[in-house]
Amino acid sequence: MSKRGSLWQRSRNALRGLFRAISEEHSLRTELLAALFAVVLLLALRASPLWWALVTVLIAVVFAAELLNTAIENLADRVSPEYDPRIGRVKDFAAAAVLVLGVAAVLVTIFLVWSRLG
Ligand SMILES: Nc1ncnc2c1ncn2[C@@H]1O[C@H](COP(=O)(O)OP(=O)(O)OP(=O)(O)O)[C@@H](O)[C@H]1O
């Protein structure tokens, strides 16, 4: 099987992964809603372009982390479907990465509201 492909083919694979993850992962859909809320908040607060840039990067990073977490979970389940404490640790580490970014997103939202209304 060839590992090379046109940019279009690779983009199609990536988009297929994105839509599959959105349809299968509840947490990704929750993050999508949170991103929508952040955009509404930015509009309502008439935030500066710098805030838009910061929130955009944060949304993308949270999404990317969740997608990698999903990929790791899928791989772990394929490699070791049975209970294995090391697989549990790997999944916990991947979930922790998403948690760290989720906390950062909440803090940035608080700072945004604070800077505009405080
Ligand atoms: N094969 C396994 N061996 C040991 N522990 C596991 C195993 N599978 C899952 N776990 C434990 O259960 C937790 C949840 O794993 P699971 O694969 O169900 O993720 P999830 O709840 O679907 O996560 P997410 O909400 O991010 O999709 C893991 O973080 C890990 O602690």
Image: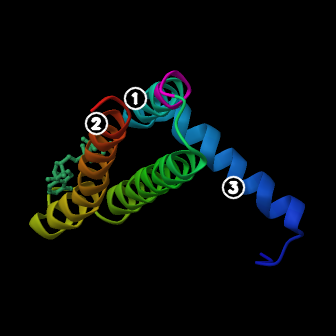
Image coords of residue 107 (percent x, y):
25, 46
Q: Quadrant of the N terminus?
A: bottom right
- Residue 38's label in the rendered image is none
Q: Which residues are magenta?
A: 41-45
Residue beneath the point at 50% across and 47% down: 51
Residue assigned mark 1: 30
Foreground of the two, 70 or 115: 115
Q: Please state which amino acid type lies under the numbered disc 3.
A: Ala
Residue beneath the point at 18% across and 58% down: 92
Residue beneath the point at 69% across and 55% down: 14
Relative vertical location of residue 109 with respect to residue 64 in this rendering, above or below: above
Q: Circles 3 and 2: CB distance less than 8 Å?
A: no
Q: Secondary structure at mark 2?
A: helix
State which tag comes first along the sequence, 1 or 2: 1
Cα distance in 3D space between marks 1 and 3: 20 Å
State which tag comes first along the sequence, 3 or 2: 3
Horizontal side of residue 34 vs 87, given as left or right:
right
Total residue callouts: 3
Residue assigned mark 3: 14
